[in-house]
Amino acid sequence: NAGVTQTPKFRILKIGQSMTLQCTQDMNHNYMYWYRQDPGMGLKLIYYSVGAGITDKGEVPNGYNVSRSTTEDFPLRLELAAPSQTSVYFCASSPLTHDTQYFGPGTRLTVL
Amino acid sequence: GNSVTQMEGPVTLSEEAFLTINCTYTATGYPSLFWYVQYPGEGLQLLLKATKADDKGSNKGFEATYRKETTSFHLEKGSVQVSDSAVYFCALSDPSNQFYFGTGTSLTVIP
């Protein structure tokens, strides 16, 4: 099993550009999550999904969008990149609610 | 609202020293509690968890006990190794399926 995979690993964007961060899991988990991790800070939940076709906002959703058309994939979309979105983004999945989350390796995004 | 507070770092210890990283939480209802570890350049990995009061989670020599009366979940290890150097995160999940993470505590173990 590959677990949770994320692409790209690194990306530099200019202000106002758009991009999609990809996340795929092969564990057939219903629950998936997107977090951002700023330097010296904990993780903040951006969006989460409890199953295909169902998404919900987390603590810091502004400036982001998500979709969940399949169990495996949970892409995160940035429409108009801003310097405040410079961060490391982690995708995670979980088989059950309140259960262990399995994290991807992260995407380091810089917006200049 | 829900939140997790953990001790500030960085923490530097000599090999074989005793480790304690404090974690307290605020939550409604009965959350599950977790410790995750992050090695440099990697994502978080589950270290241990506890799902109800008085449960003790343990793994790789690390332990933490879910104390509802003090709303705490302190991480302990009797004898740390250089390979334990990492950032440790305390976290809780609430009945609405949201997770809340502490700010992380960086641990460096020197030989």
Image: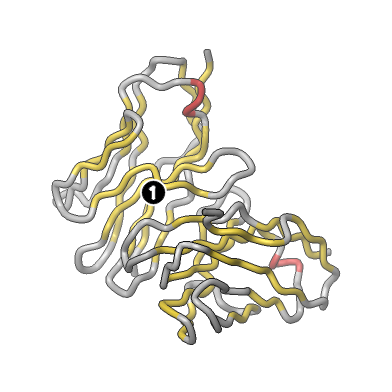
Q: Quadrant of residue A60?
A: bottom right
Q: Residues within 10 Å of mark 1 (few under 14, many from 20)?
A: many
Q: Left or right: A71 with respect to B31?
A: right
Q: Left or right: A64 with respect to A25?
A: right
Residue B20 position, x and y percent, is 34, 31
Kindly identify the residue that appears in the image at 61 percent across and 56 percent down.
Answer: A38
The image shows residue B6, relative to residue A75, as above or below, that is above
Q: Quadrant of residue A79?
A: bottom right
Colour logic: secondary structure
The image shows residue B52, relative to residue A74, as above or below, that is above
Residue hosting label 1:
B90
Residue A2 position, x and y percent, is 56, 54
Camera-side residue: A84 or B108?
B108
Kindly identify the residue that appears in the image at 33 percent across and 63 percent down.
Answer: B93
Camera-side residue: A29 or A61?
A29
Residue furthest to the bottom? A53
Kindly identify the residue that appears in the image at 24 percent across and 50 percent down.
Answer: B50
Position of the C terminus of chain A, as image quadrant, is bottom right
Residue B95 position, x and y percent, is 27, 71
Residue furthest to the top? B111
Q: Left or right: B100 with respect to A107?
A: left
Q: Left or right: B34 with respect to A13?
A: left
Residue B10 position, x and y percent, is 52, 33
Q: Quadrant of residue A14?
A: bottom right
Camera-side residue: A58 or B25?
A58
SS label for mark 1: strand
Q: Amino acid at mark 1?
A: Cys
Question: How many marks overall?
Answer: 1
